[in-house]
Amino acid sequence: MGLAKYADDGFFAPRKIADVLRTTSEEVARTAGLGRDAVQRQERSRSAKTQRRLREMVEVINKVEPRFGSELIAYAWYRSEPLPGFSGQTAMQLVREGRIDEVLDYVDAVDAGVHV
């Protein structure tokens, strides 16, 4: 899946992300740990914080999508599957805490056949 399908004018676009994931912009905001206002107002949706949160979410979903064969299943995994070794936290919870590197390392380890 290409990142361009999530972008508009060089920025991650909450509505495009929502369309691909068959959800709402408000749900994308909650999933990324943002307020509803951050995705409804263009100047807020293009802020550094909002763009970073959207990028991190999309980056993890993009990385696991080949494993699941679908953006929707990858999104469901991101939001609801507790990761072993992280006290039952999901990828979404870890990313919202600023721990994206740990999530990406976990995914790389699983993809390499290392069971965590």
Image: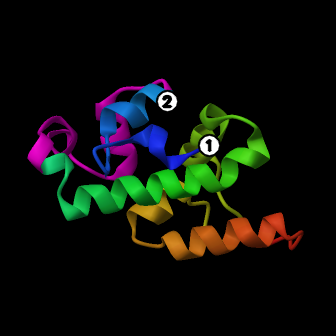
Number of the label disc, if any, that sits on residue 20: 2
Instruction: Please report the residue visible at 38 percent of the width from the left and 33 percent of the height from the top.
Output: 16
Number of the label disc, if any, that sits on residue 1: 1
Binning the other alpha carbons within 10 Å of mark 1 as few (below 14), some (14 to 19) or many (20 upward) gives: few
Q: How far across and down, in percent of the image, does residue 78 sit?
A: 57, 48
The quarter of the image holding the N terminus is top right
- The quadrant holding residue 115 is bottom right
Q: How far across and down, in percent of the image, does residue 47 sit?
A: 17, 58
Q: Secondary structure at mark 1?
A: loop
Predominant secondary structure, magenta span: helix
Kindly indicate whether the residue at mark 2 contacts the one at mark 1 (C-beta within 8 angstroms): yes
Q: Is residue 47 left or right of residue 34?
A: left
- The quadrant holding residue 96 is bottom left
Q: Amino acid at mark 1?
A: Met
Give the extent of the magenta segment: 22-43
Query: CA separation, marks 1 and 2?
Result: 10 Å
